Amino acid sequence: MRWSRGFVGVVILVSATGCSAGLGGGSQTADPESTKVQTTGPASEGAEVGTGDAGPANDALPSGTSLRFEAQPFALDDDGEYSATIVAPVGWDEGRFLGVAFEPPSDEDLGFFTKMSVETGCDGMCEPTDWEKRLNGPDGFLTMKTKDADVVEQRSTAGSDGTVLITKDSFGTNVLVLRWDDSADHFFQCEADLDEDDANLAEAFTAACEASLPDWFPVG
């Protein structure tokens, strides 16, 4: 049985109100009605930042699904200090809540718990640090994430330090991609929660999150 999404996402559907120049070397302006960022200069042209490719995510979609992904730049904070090229689902509702959140429209044939989010994280540090040590430490984010979890897959990311983590619980499948650089004060976090009926989308959302790239440290 599918649930209607109803009021889900009402809290997060708040538009970004501003954006200053980012750290990727280009200039950015924010549309007051959207979290999307128009990026020019090196941040959009360089091979190391802001060059997400939606192709692998679309190629990984099961046949017959209407879901498609496209790469677009988004601000992850109101100050424009952190932004990213996100390979995001086309036509999903966009909102702001500690980053950018995406939820399928109510008429989409997807489960109640299915959603995607992209944000920055610092695990209580918010300064350059040994992120692998911190995240896997006694009270680290990844330690807590994998504790008592059914880990389906865990591996390193390509192009930067980071991890790909896929877990399952009674609600469905969780896809998490973290990227970090020890010289950066925040890591990059892309996550998708998939309802148990949408578990066949895990490969596509994993590819989407791996292709989504931060602009405040180099990837590639």
Image: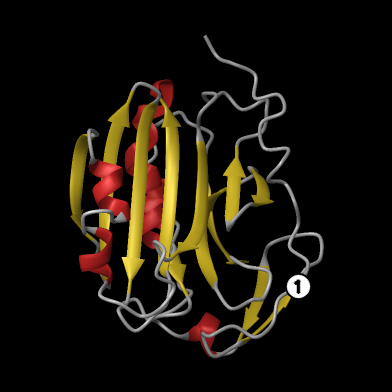
Q: Is residue 9 visible?
A: yes
Which residue corresponds to the image point at 70% horizontal and 24% vertical from the top-left? 6
Three-letter code for the amino acid on which mark 1 is drawn: Gly
Categorize mark 1 by other alpha carbons within 10 Å: few (<14), some (14-19), many (20+).
some
Q: Position of residue 21 (x, y in %)?
A: 65, 86
Q: Position of residue 59 (x, y in %)?
A: 37, 47
Which picture quadrant has residue 150?
top left
Is residue 211 positioned above or below 21 on the image?
above
Is residue 59 positioned above or below 119 on the image?
above
Q: Relative to the observer, which residue lies in front, 163 or 90?
A: 163
Which residue corresponds to the image point at 32% horizontal and 53% vertical from the top-left? 141
Is residue 150 rendered to the left or right of residue 12? Answer: left
Outermost residue, top direction? 1
Q: Is residue 52 visible?
A: no
Is residue 205 rendered to the left or right of residue 17? Answer: left
Q: Relative to the observer, which residue lies in front, 54 or 168?
A: 168
